[in-house]
Amino acid sequence: MVRGMIAGQQSTNPVMEYWNTDPHQHFLLRVADLTVSVVSDGSVKLGVEAKKEEFIVDNGVPDVTIKAAWGELSDDGVGNKLFDAGSVWQLYQQGESYVFRFKSLAFGPRPYKIARFSPDFSHGEVYLQRDFFEPGQPVDPLSAPLEELLYGTLLARGRGVEIHACGLIDAQGHGHLFVGKSGAGKTTMARLWQDAPGVTILSDDRIILRKMDGRIWMYGTPWHGAGGMASPDKILLTGIYFLQKGDRNELLPRRNVEAALSLSACSFPPFYSREAVEFTLGFAEEVARETPCYDLRVVPDMRVVEFIIDQI
């Protein structure tokens, strides 16, 4: 339950274009050509983390409009629980609305943040428990894990998929996607390519794939890994490489079905929605069918960069 709701809390017309004026009262976050507008009710001083600043844009038509306010948060009247991620967050359905509740062991049993969204996720509100935040300091209402949950939901509604991968643009303008779970070598691969001239690292940990104008595009995200690499750029996807450790650098073609399964295993669909999971599986199959896919056995040194460039 939230006490102290924002008066007249309805969506701002989503077809209107917005301009940033005071960044402490309003910002526009754009990731993978999906724009989220965050507006303070006037009392919350807004801010974003440093790595996310490159994804803040000056104007645009938002796909989602969110208002942020302080609130007195409690565990009362939360509705029907759809998903429970343990002590970190839970998702409830309250009437037609979807409600995310965020907790921290450091703060005790009360939620420090509640986010409520309309059925189509075109608008929402984020309420913050004031005494859990440093007085007078900027607050990012979308701070992890909310922004990734929100974008994951938007993507899974027919727009694309987020992949656990390193993505980069080489000096010739090719888009390479290196896929693997934690420990597979994504950040190592990013660091090797980072030293090559003319290369842009889109992310060393999270990449978004979308199909636009009949072609598969790869987008950088602000959700980086240990290497701290993130770029808002995008590129047409040239090749997908499933990382494996090896005694020598070797590329082995991966069959479409196997590639689709591996892509799905490294994706982040909203598991609380059957339709979202089905879309993600189908989209992974489409990407694998339309993009050359390989098992990449690597020796983690600069020779692998030269090896891949030579193969192209």
Image: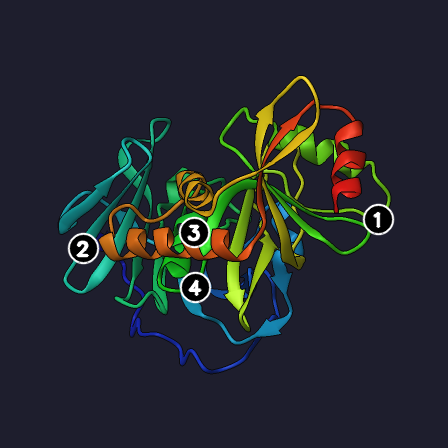
Q: Earlier in the sequence, mark 2 or mark 1?
A: 2
> Residue 193: image x %, image y %?
76, 37
Instruction: Say if residue 307 shows up in the picture.
Output: yes
Q: Where 24 falls versus 101 (above or below)?
A: below
Q: Earlier in the sequence, mark 3 or mark 4?
A: 4
Q: Which mark is residue 284?
A: 3
Image point 57% across, 26% down: which residue? 244
Q: Using the numbered discs, state the Cα–Cα distance from disc 4 to disc 1 in whole angstroms.
A: 30 Å
| Residue at mark 1 to residue at mark 3: CA–CA distance | 29 Å
- Which residue position is annotated with label 1? 198
Q: Is residue 122 left or right of residue 234?
A: left
- Please state if 191 lies on the left or on the right of 258 as rendered: right
Picture coordinates of residue 237 (x, y %)? Answer: 62, 55
Residue toward you, 113 or 144: 144
Q: Which residue is mark 4?
A: 159
| Tag 2 residue | 93
* Lower position in the chain sequence, tag 4 or tag 1: 4
**Amino acid tagged 1:** Gly
> How many tags in the picture?
4
Report the side of 292 relative to 36 (left or right): right
The kind of residue on which mark 3 rests is Ala
Circle 3 or circle 4, nearest the eye: 3
How far apart are the alpha carbons under marks 2 and 3? 28 Å
Which of discs 4 and 2 lies nearer the camera? The answer is 4
Query: Residue 203 sits in which quadrant?
Result: top right
